[in-house]
Amino acid sequence: MELIKPDIGLLFWMIVSFSILLYVLIKFAWKPILNALKDRERSISKSLLAAQRAKDEMAKIEFGNEKITQLAKIEKQNILKEAKELKNKIIEEARENAKLEAKKIVEEARQSVEHEKNQAINEIKNQIAALSVDIAEKIIKQKLGKESKQKELIDDLVKDIDLN
């Protein structure tokens, strides 16, 4: 029963020993424990702050990556657009050059045909003239084969000259 009803002496010594223990703890252990807790709290705060900074930097990096990706997409679109415009320009220039070349070829062919036509017409004229002279020569030889006919022709020509 002594444990249930403590004696005043026991209670006194318990309070004294507890006070000494408490004084020793406060004097020697309490400050280092509080310092350790403060250091731990500071360390956790620094870690949380570092984590927040890292999170912010990651957000900035992600934003930067997104921005770079968007810029790259825009640049890609611009390059593709320029390439398409260049392709269309080259095709259009090729068409224009082909049209000009075709016109030039057609004009040269037309001139060549015109020249050939003129040569053919001149050749035909020359042949007709030569044939006409041959035919006239044969007709004159046939009609003027006799001297009497030649005299008649000369007389007719002289009469025509006088009349004019």
Image: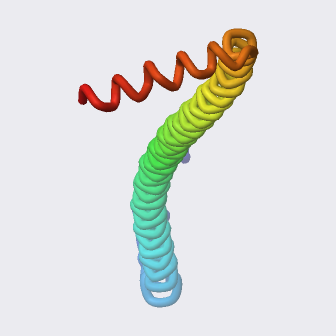
- In this rendering, the answer to whether 135 lies above or below 162 is above
**Closest to the observer, 32 or 82:** 82
Say which residue appears at 44% left-offset and 25% top-offset.
157
Which quadrant of the rendered structure holds the C terminus? top left
Please identify the quarter of the rendering in which residue 118 is found: top right
**Closest to the observer, 53 or 39:** 53
Please identify the quarter of the rendering in which residue 7 is found: bottom left
Please identify the quarter of the rendering in which residue 9 is found: bottom left
- In this rendering, the answer to whether 57 lies above or below 126 is below
Answer left or right for 74 relative to 151.
Answer: left
Residue 39 image point, x, y percent: 48, 79
**Closest to the observer, 149 or 19:** 149
Q: Residue furthest left?
A: 164
Residue 162 image point, x, y percent: 29, 31
**Closest to the observer, 81 or 128:** 128
Residue 104 image point, x, y percent: 54, 41
Residue 5 makes an appearance in the image = no
Say which residue appears at 58% left-offset and 39% top-offset.
108
Residue 61 image point, x, y percent: 47, 60
Q: How many marks?
A: 0
Say which residue appears at 41% left-offset and 53% top-offset.
67
Q: How is the image coloured?
A: rainbow
Say which residue appears at 46% left-offset and 82% top-offset.
35
Residue 74 makes an appearance in the image = yes
- In this rendering, the answer to whether 78 lies above or below 106 is below
Which quadrant of the rendered structure holds the N terminus? top right
